[in-house]
Image (cartoon, rainbow, N blue to C red):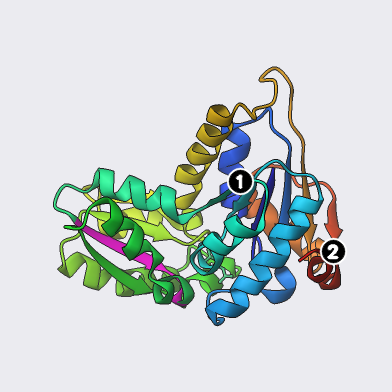
Amino acid sequence: MGVFDSGVGGLTVLHECLVTMPHEDFVYLGDHARLPYGPRPLDEVRQFAREIGAYLQSQGVKLVVNACNTATSAALPQLQEDLDVPVVGVITPEAHAAVQATRNRRIGLLATEGTVAAGRYAELVHALDAGVRLLPVACPRLVPLIESADPFGAETTEAVREYAAALKDAEVDTVILGCTHYPLIRPIFQRVFGRDVTLVFSAEETAREVAETLARKGYENDARREGSYRFLTTGDPDAFREMGARFLQLPIAEVEHVELAALGAAA
Ligand code: DGL
């Protein structure tokens, strides 16, 4: 399977996929040369996603996971049209889980500027329940803080408190954490929102959706084998390895460099 993200954040999705489907093979591509996607115009992110999707398909994967909320917001329908293999994004599974979980039908969304601007979560939530109120909040400070040397520092807690304030005032009972980086600071979110608020993370919901897709299509590998996983980056392989282990929480051996020109040529 091919999994991609703007950088290391999608490794939280890969982590869940590896523990849910240990018998499958994975290739993960991080587009570090063009990170971050969050503040970029959506049509630029769409072009990046199309190049990466085509490249992964040319590597012979049987399914592509768009493990970046911003790239899923910008490009999921186009990717599904372009590619012959199925494409699973990170937004639909979360929207579905949030609509199922909410009791007062007030859902909050924390995500990048690009994801909030695209409005895909609102479309998907309302397609499932037109009576739900979705409150989106863009959180531009969180990705750099989570990637910093001190992700659990006071500054991160302050930023989460600030972004959560409007959602707490609106008394949402469910919050979608709509960005690949956010599972890394799960305890901070849980403490700020309290136990009564259900937090929905893309990594877990997406892994479940991928496993179900493979099972229903009959595309699964033999459950007795042990799968492999490997890594590609458009940036610096050493930097990927160092930062990546924190997000993957599993060993990272080889990381190969891929030229942006190779992605462009595949599209
Ligand atoms: N992967 C991005 C997302 O999930 C966050 C990092 C970025 O802005 O590129 O939205």
Q: Main secondary structure of the magenta part?
A: strand
Measure how far apart labels 2 and 1 are at the Cα level: 23 Å
Report x, y in % for residue 166: 23, 73
Image point 69% across, 75% down: which residue?
A: 34
Q: Is residue 148 visible?
A: yes
Q: Which of the two discs, 2 and 1, sits closer to the camera?
A: 1
| Quadrant hosting residue 41 | bottom right
Q: Please say if 187 is above or below 35.
A: above
Check the image and name the residue furthest to the top. 224
Report x, y in % for residue 156: 44, 70
Task: Rate crowding at label 1 as few (under 14), some (14 to 19) or many (20 or more) other CA atoms within 10 Å.
Answer: some
Task: Rate crowding at label 2 as few (under 14), some (14 to 19) or many (20 or more) other CA atoms within 10 Å.
Answer: some
Which corner quadrant holds the C terminus?
A: bottom right
Image point 74% across, 21% down: which residue?
A: 225
Image point 20% across, 54% down: which residue?
A: 173
- Disc 2 on helix, strand or loop? loop
Q: Which numbered marker is on residue 86?
A: 1
**Left or right, 111 with reference to 166:** right
In the image, the segment drawn in magenta is 106-113
Q: Which numbered marker is on residue 115?
A: none
Ligand 1 lies in which image quarter?
bottom right
Instruction: Say which amino acid is labelled 2.
Output: Val
Report x, y in % for residue 169: 16, 69
Q: Mark 2 vs mark 1: which is more N-terminal?
A: 1
Q: Is residue 150 visible?
A: no
Let me know if residue 209 is in the magenta part. no
Disc 2 designates what residue?
258
**Left or right, 43 with reference to 52:** left
Let me know if residue 108 is in the magenta part. yes
